[in-house]
Amino acid sequence: MIGTKLPRRVILSPNIEPRASGKFPRLLILHYTGMETAELACNWLCTGESRVSCHYLVDEAGRITQMVGEEMRAWHAGVSTWEDEVDVNSSSIGIEIHNPGHSGGYPDFPERQMIAVSALSQDIVNRHNILPQHVLAHSDVAPGRKIDPGEKFDWRFLHAQGVGHWVEPMAIVSGVFLQQGDCGEPVSALQGLLKMYGYGIDINGQYGDRTRVVVEAFQRHFRPQRVDGIADQSTVATLHTLLKARPAAVA
């Protein structure tokens, strides 16, 4: 079983299968468990009836549990897309981070947990040559359907440890914005930028439900100070800066 050499326990999940032919880990997807305790989450992820699994679980104390070998396809992302990839499970490694989630009070992620997530993520991206912009939230690949790990997750800290893509969000100011119900070329331009970054969105010039939830997903990850689905100047400027700073793929 391929996995990290960091201290860990191993509890195998039955919910696995081979990766699709020609697929390999090029994405790292971060989740929160959304359950009361890490042990309940581990039990659920390792029970056949759940039909879900993940490669790793990090509890609030920073303990790492591996449940699926990295060579295998875990069932963690569900119906998801990123760039041109529609089988995200075959092209990713998933980390569940214990947190009760929004429905459970949504506490902060403890420092020791973030340190463990950072170390594990760094180990994974280095071994698999995963690009910084391919370290993603579950909400990035499944906007509207998922909101984890949420706006409290410290992407800035992760980036400071050499994992993921991040720029300081532009300040929130008053001014021109786009919102649900708008249409026309400015909306098409916004949709084009989001699609260029990797989000699954059509360029149709209509600021409908899909555009709103994609903007919310972007804000949760990259402009967490306000998550409202409105493309204000701060959101659009942050998106522009991210695209300009996006690392190039190494051949």
Image (tube, rainbow, N blue to C red):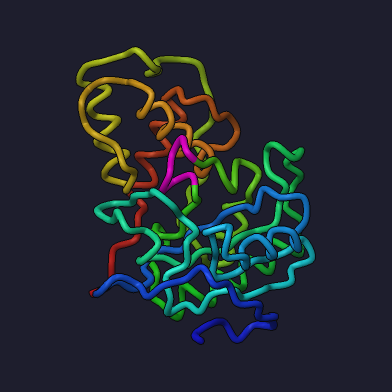
Question: Compared to 240, does 179 lie above or below?
Answer: above
Q: Quadrant of the C terminus?
A: bottom left
Q: Give the magenta-colored segment's residue range.
A: 139-145
Please, which residue is most extreme toward the front here? 49
Residue drawn 70% across the image and 36% down it: 103
Residue drawn 74% across the image and 59% down it: 40
Query: What is the quadrant of residue 110 in the picture?
Result: bottom right
Left or right of 83? Residue 54 is right
Left or right of 182? Residue 185 is left
Q: How many marks?
A: 0
- Give x and y (percent) for residue 217: 47, 38
Residue 143 belongs to magenta span: yes
Question: Compared to 32, does 200 lie above or below?
Answer: above
**Residue situated in front as seen by the camera: 3 or 11:** 11
Residue drawn 35% across the image and 39% down it: 240
Residue 44 belongs to magenta span: no
- Give x and y (percent) for residue 78: 43, 52
Residue drawn 28% across the image and 66% down it: 249
Left or right of 41? Residue 124 is left
- Give x and y (percent) for residue 106: 72, 41
**Residue situated in front as seen by the camera: 141 or 219:** 141
- Give x and y (percent) for residue 165: 45, 56
Query: What is the quadrant of residue 71 in the picture?
Result: bottom left
Question: Compared to 190, does 147 lie above or below?
Answer: below
